Amino acid sequence: MQHSRIIELTKENKDVFTLKFDSTIAARPGQFIMIWSPGGKEIPMSLSDTSNPPTITFRTFGETTKTIAKLKVGDRFFYRGPYGNSYPVPTGRVAYVAGGTGLASVNAMMLKYGGDVYVGARTKDDLFLLRNDFRIATDDGSAGFKGTVIDLFLPHVNEYDYIFVCGPEPMVKTMLDRIDRKIKAKVYISLERLMKCGVGICDSCSINGVRVCKDGTVFSMEEVLSLSEFGVYKRNEAGKIEFFVNGKR
């Protein structure tokens, strides 16, 4: 466990924050750290910028994230990592497809390699880390295209050589159900699952025996398609199975 001091804490929207911390961490895009602050639990967070000093971008949804969002510049927090594998180095035309806080993960790649970014959110108020060249979709049409980011992206899928995806599991499953399996692009997906240990011991993030934290979090499209449990059910903090709405294979 290491400790670091907060350099900057930026409120991106009503419940999303970007934290820049004093570290010379050697991380690659797609990797994550396990972060902890007194008063909360230890949780995983994707690095939204892997340069030094690095950043994490997160949504406040539970006790730990709300505790971290209340920290001030100069305060310390604790972390371990980085863990997991990383996105491969792309060549040719590159697209990033992100939903929710999945943008944090692909943002680290975009900063390093560039490319076209497709972002989806419920409303314009849920968007963050935006740049003028981002292609935006909102469910209610309050910003950009009205519909899902998958609806926005799929007409352009054949324009790219590499596609990097991160977002809620139902979003990713929808994309996999609709995408042409014979496309020329190489597709890589960073999966989001509940993680308790981050190093492959607790099995809480397992899908068909594949440990997202240790064996991923980045997988090829073919690897994800081989996981029959993906998009169907997950386990909660108590280890109980929870089915996704309309989850089916």
Image (cartoon, rainbow, N blue to C red):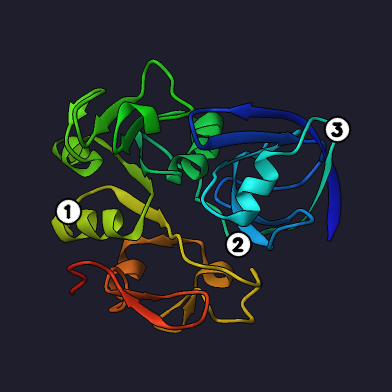
User: Which one is nearer the viewer's eye here, 181 or 152?
Assistant: 152
Which quadrant of the view contains residue 155? top left
The C terminus - image quarter: bottom left
Q: Earlier in the sequence, mark 2 or mark 3?
A: 3
Going by the numbered disc 3, the residue's amino acid type is Gly
Residue 179 is tagged as 1
Q: Please tell me whether residue 149 is drawn above or below residue 226 in the rendered image.
A: above
How far, Cα to Cα, is label 2 from label 1? Answer: 26 Å
Estimate the x, y position of residue 239 in percent, counting from the top left: 49, 82
Within 10 Å of disc 2 (Cα), the crowding (few <14, some 14-19, many 20+) is many
Query: Which residue position holds label 3?
Result: 74
User: Which one is nearer the viewer's eye here, 30 or 21?
Assistant: 21
Estimate the x, y position of residue 232 in percent, counting from the top left: 27, 73
In percent of the image, x 18 and y 74: which residue is there? Answer: 248
Residue 84 is tagged as 2
Q: Is residue 148 left or right of residue 164?
A: left
All told, the count of numbered labels is 3
Which quadrant of the view contains residue 231? bottom left
Q: Please tell me whether residue 73 is drawn above or below residue 215 in the rendered image.
A: above
Which quadrant of the view contains residue 85? bottom right
